[in-house]
Amino acid sequence: GRLPRPVGVIQLDGKTVLITGANSGIGKETARELARRGARVVMACRDLTRAEQAAEEIRQSTGNGNVVTRHLDLASMYSIRQFAKDFLDSEDRLDILINNAGVMMCPRWLTEDGFETQLAVNHLSHFLLTNLLLPMLKSSAPSRVVNVSSIAHHGGRIDFDDLFFSKKPYSRLEGYRQSKLANVLFTRELSRRLTGSGVSSFCLHPGIIRTELVRHVMDWFPIPPLRALLRLPSLLLMKSPWQGCQTTVYCAVMPGLEERSGLYFSDCAEKEASAEGRDDEVARRLWEESARLVGLKDTC
Ligand SMILES: NC(=O)c1ccc[n+]([C@@H]2O[C@H](COP(=O)([O-])OP(=O)(O)OC[C@H]3O[C@@H](n4cnc5c(N)ncnc54)[C@H](O)[C@@H]3O)[C@@H](O)[C@H]2O)c1
């Protein structure tokens, strides 16, 4: 996980970075790495108590006091609109938006808006948030949107006839794959629509990282010794959250990456997304359907 040399030394003084789900795992280490580089870091989190603890730890370990928390529940379109309004009213710029928060393989929970939770939290929320913040991203250009997707987008499919598993039986894995494929397609279509605006977008697979993301998979193993057994290989095979933030940081700060806008990265390098993730027609259709679902009339 060592970063290519120019990325390691880049400073972000005077820049503002917004990271969703920054109180744990990959998001927290991303916040730390960008705070270390001097950016103003806004950590948008659902649990403000945990977020404030993480922010304090980051302020202490980096010496950057310009790390703040704001409340954002991505499972609520109301919360996202409220958050975006407050952000636009109180911040003067946004240089890097990192759509990192995610939920994996939870039961078929419906959000207050009636959306299946994985598609809502992993994709629709970030689609809405990004669109609402676009005026500020544009006025701060050159700026970047970084979407944390996953290798799990391979094998995913956007089922336009039944996005929320209302007709077919729910599959936790298919739901996750669909949402992570949506991240890849959103990145692609956003980049296409923003050509020439100075806003570029990237998506990535962070690696297989030891975080709290597996909490809903652990639900299946109710007996503590079984869980411990399951954790053993993860201790040996999975990478640390710090290693997990490297490709996000790369996409956020690597000079000259604008030319590669719209594309997918892994291990701090460009990788080919799945065939489904490169389908421009599906990307366009997903954009239109997402805009309809979240009630956005004027998108870019
Ligand atoms: N860990 C891995 O191996 C791995 C692999 C591929 C992709 N990813 C992706 O990396 C990203 C970060 O995950 P992580 O591994 O650090 O896991 P994590 O569970 O530690 O972090 C996810 C964050 O999202 C937040 N979140 C969840 N629901 C939210 C909501 N409704 N509102 C606001 N915040 C919410 C959580 O509170 C948490 O801070 C996710 O998008 C995940 O899909 C992780």
Image (cartoon, rainbow, N blue to C red):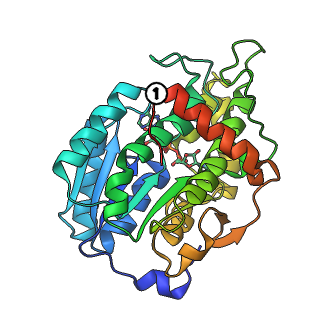
Residue 120, given in percent of the width and then of the height, sits at 54, 30
The answer to whether one can see residue 298 in this image is: yes
Locate residue 3: give its quadrant.
bottom right
**Is 26 placed left or right of 28 in the picture?**
right
Look at the picture and state if 118 lies above or below 25.
Answer: above
Farthest-out residue, bottom: 5
Classify residue 103 by image quadrant.
Answer: top right
Q: Say if 90 sits above or below 242 in the image.
A: above
Which residue, given by chain and number where applicable, does mark 1 sit on? 295
Residue 253 position (above or below residue 71): below
Residue drawn at point x = 65 percent, y = 56 percent: 238
Q: Residue furthest top?
A: 167
Whole-percent x and y of residue 187?
A: 59, 54
Q: Is residue 229 visible?
A: no
Q: Nearer the viewer, residue 282 or 164?
A: 282
- Dividing the picture into quarters, in which one does residue 228 lie? top right
